[in-house]
């Protein structure tokens, strides 16, 4: 994500322009957090904590509002990953993937399995539909926790 200008430099404002959203400081800050975070999946509270450490004076309500706008325009994807916790990730054209949530730590790991996707297509077709999207979230406890 981040559209390149003719000189090859990434224009951080272009994605906001393309989405039809006005360029505002809160939107730029939140988008920057998602682009630069080592953690791919962030909850609103995670974004808010990062903003606080950066001494930004945006409230949690502003964070929720920006996240909702980004989801609505397709800049972010939202997933419900247990305990009704919504997390967001950049909608950067990455191949479709599932999420594995650790029941002991809450850590989220991504996985991709073509076999699962192909099987879903067959199941959906057998039920008289065409697969247009899917969301897979699996939950597990690390094997090392059971020792």
Image: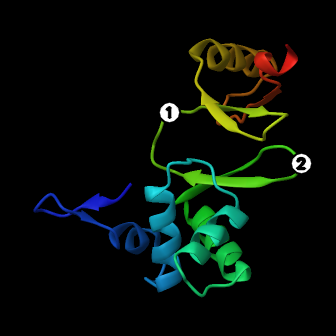
| Front residue (pair 63, 143) | 143
Q: Residue furthest front?
A: 147
Image quadrant in which you'd find residue 130: top right
Task: Residue under label 2, please give it.
Answer: 83
What is the crowding at mark 1: few (fewer than 14 residues within 10 Å), some, or many (at least 20)?
Answer: few
Relative to 126, is 6 on the left or the right?
left
Relative height, residue 145 to residue 3 (above, below): above
Relative to 114, is 120 on the left or the right?
right
What is the crowding at mark 2: few (fewer than 14 residues within 10 Å), some, or many (at least 20)?
Answer: few
Relative height, residue 59 to residue 7 (above, below): below
Task: Residue under label 1, please give it.
Answer: 95
Q: Residue furthest left?
A: 7
Relative to 2, is 88 on the left or the right?
right
Image quadrant in which you'd find residue 113: top right
Tell me the residue at 47%/38% (across/down): 94
Image quadrant in which you'd find residue 110: top right
- Looking at the image, is mark 1 or mark 2 earlier in the sequence? 2
Q: Could you say where residue 23 lies in the image, as x and y percent from the top left?
A: 43, 82
Report how far apart the C-alphas of labels 1 and 2 lie in the structure: 26 Å
Query: Quadrant where the N terminus lies?
Result: bottom left
Q: Could you say where residue 82 lies in the image, as x and y percent from the top left?
A: 85, 43
| Front residue (pair 121, 9) | 9
């Amino acid at each position: 994500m981040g559209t390149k200008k003719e000189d090859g430099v990434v224009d951080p404002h272009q994605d906001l322009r393309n989405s039809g959203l006005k360029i505002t400081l809160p939107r730029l800050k939140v988008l920057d957090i998602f682009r630069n975070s080592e953690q791919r999946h962030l909850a609103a509270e995670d974004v808010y904590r990062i903003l606080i450490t950066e001494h930004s004076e945006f409230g949690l309500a502003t964070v929720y509002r920006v996240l909702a706008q980004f989801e609505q325009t397709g800049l972010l994807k939202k997933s419900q990953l247990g305990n009704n916790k919504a997390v967001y990730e950049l909608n950067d054209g990455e191949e479709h993937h599932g999420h594995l949530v650790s029941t002991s730590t809450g850590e989220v790991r991504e996985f991709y399995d073509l076999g699962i996707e192909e099987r879903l297509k067959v199941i959906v077709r057998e039920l008289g539909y065409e697969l247009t999207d899917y969301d897979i979230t699996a939950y597990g406890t690390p094997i090392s926790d059971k020792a």
